[in-house]
Image (cartoon, grey):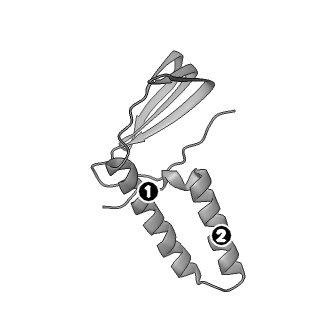
Amino acid sequence: MAAYQLYRNTTLGNTLQETLDELIQFQQISPNLAIRVLLQFDRAINQALANKVRSKISFKADKLNTYRFCDNVWTFIMNNVEFKEMHDFAQVDKLKIVACDGKGNAGPQSSNTPLD
């Protein structure tokens, strides 16, 4: 099963890509090896999130701006979202959620980006 590349746009994913680019630039690794490392990162992060994370969080939004379902990928854009986990609370003005089917084959690759 192929893994989604959504997590390449996280801080960890971006840092890995920058490091690999630097290693390629200084000819310490080949571009082919960098691609293999990124593919392994995709598999590992998807597997870790699916199997190791057990915490649950609830959220509610004042307004659902947009929702879309295309190629087995749901996208939601919401305003004034409140998150609650046990005693912790957080609020954001805008939130974009990209939800992919984790049990089937990976569909189109998209990015998970916060909205400013």
Q: Quadrant of residue 54?
A: top left
Q: Residues within 10 Å of mark 2 (few under 14, many from 20)?
A: few
Badge 1 element: helix
- Residue drawn where x is 45% and y is 31% of the image: 68
The dot on residue 102 is none
Which residue was labeled with disc 1?
45
Quadrant assignment for the C terminus:
top right
Q: Position of residue 73 (x, y in %)?
A: 40, 41
Give the residue at x 58% y 84%.
30
Residue 19 in the image, given as x and y percentages of width and height: 65, 69
Residue depicted at x 44% and y 68%: 40
Callout 2–callout 1 Cβ contact below 8 Å: no
Using the rendered view, name the quadrant where residue 45 is placed: bottom left
Residue reaching furthest top?
62
Picture coordinates of residue 16, whole percent (x, y): 60, 64
- Tag 2, which secondary structure? helix
On screen, 57 above or below 52? above
Q: Is residue 53 left or right of residue 94?
A: left
Viewer-closest of 2 and 48: 48
Mark 2 vs mark 1, CA separation in Å: 17 Å
Residue at x 31%, y 55% (from the top left corner): 105
